[in-house]
Image: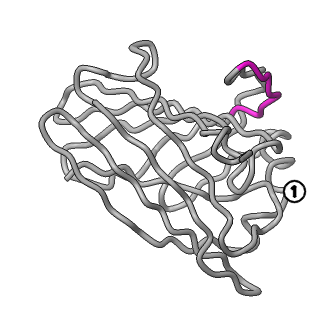
Amino acid sequence: MFTMKLVFPFLPLLPPAVGSTSRYELVPDRSRTSTSFIKRADAQFTVVATSETSTQLEIDYDYVVASASGSDIQVKEVSVSSFDPANLDRLRAGEVFTTSDATIQHAGYEKVKLAGLVYSTDVLKVTNVKSPMSGLTDIVATVYMSPSVPLLGILRVDAAAKYNGVRLKAGLDWEHWAELD
């Protein structure tokens, strides 16, 4: 089974309400995704519980990779302090966040066009990502964050890794039309 662990050391938005969702879909563009290996992938994040100290996110994802396919649902707990907007300000000022799962640093700002709309984003580089499975190494992600995007604040993710020595990349975009219905 091929799964990729998603790392959220902080989320620069207010804690979301139970039932809030955000959906992402694989971009089948060869410049962003290894389309010969990764055929389809999508993910939905839903807030299933909140407390004074944490928020539980249900991560529901489906994928088709080479000749394998599957789906999974996981629940991750995110600390309420993760939603502190000061964390993004600290990254913008040059601080590097290191967790047991990854290292995150601010890599500047970029305008990102998605479905005809232009978003101003903070670009974060995520390196030293802890591998969720055997054979998956050298995981790196570029995350484009915008306060315009509900729940996670993540507009786009471009990830790269090696799987048993083969270089792979995958681009995921926020399914904005689903959120705005």
Q: Check the image and name the residue furthest to the bottom.
A: 52
Residue denoted by label 1: 86
Q: Secondary structure at mark 1?
A: helix
Q: How many marks overall?
A: 1
* Residue 19 versus residue 124 in the image, above or below: below
Please name whichever residue, 152 or 178, is drawn nearer the observer in this view of the structure. 178
* Residue 130 versus residue 46 in the image, above or below: above
Image position of 85 (left or right of 66): right
Please name whichever residue, 166 or 148, is drawn nearer the observer in this view of the structure. 148
Task: Residue 2: give x, y in percent of width and height.
Answer: 24, 48
* Residue 181 versus residue 132 in the image, above or below: above
Report the magenta residues as a range.
116-123
**Circle 1 residues within 10 Å: few <14, some 14–19, many ≥20:** few
Image position of 28 (left or right of 36): right
* Residue type at the position of mark 1: Ala
Q: Main secondary structure of the magenta part?
A: strand
Task: Residue 120: give x, y in percent of width and height.
Answer: 82, 28
Image position of 38 (left or right of 59): left
Q: Is residue 112 magenta?
A: no
Q: Is residue 118 magenta?
A: yes
Q: Quadrant of residue 104?
A: top right
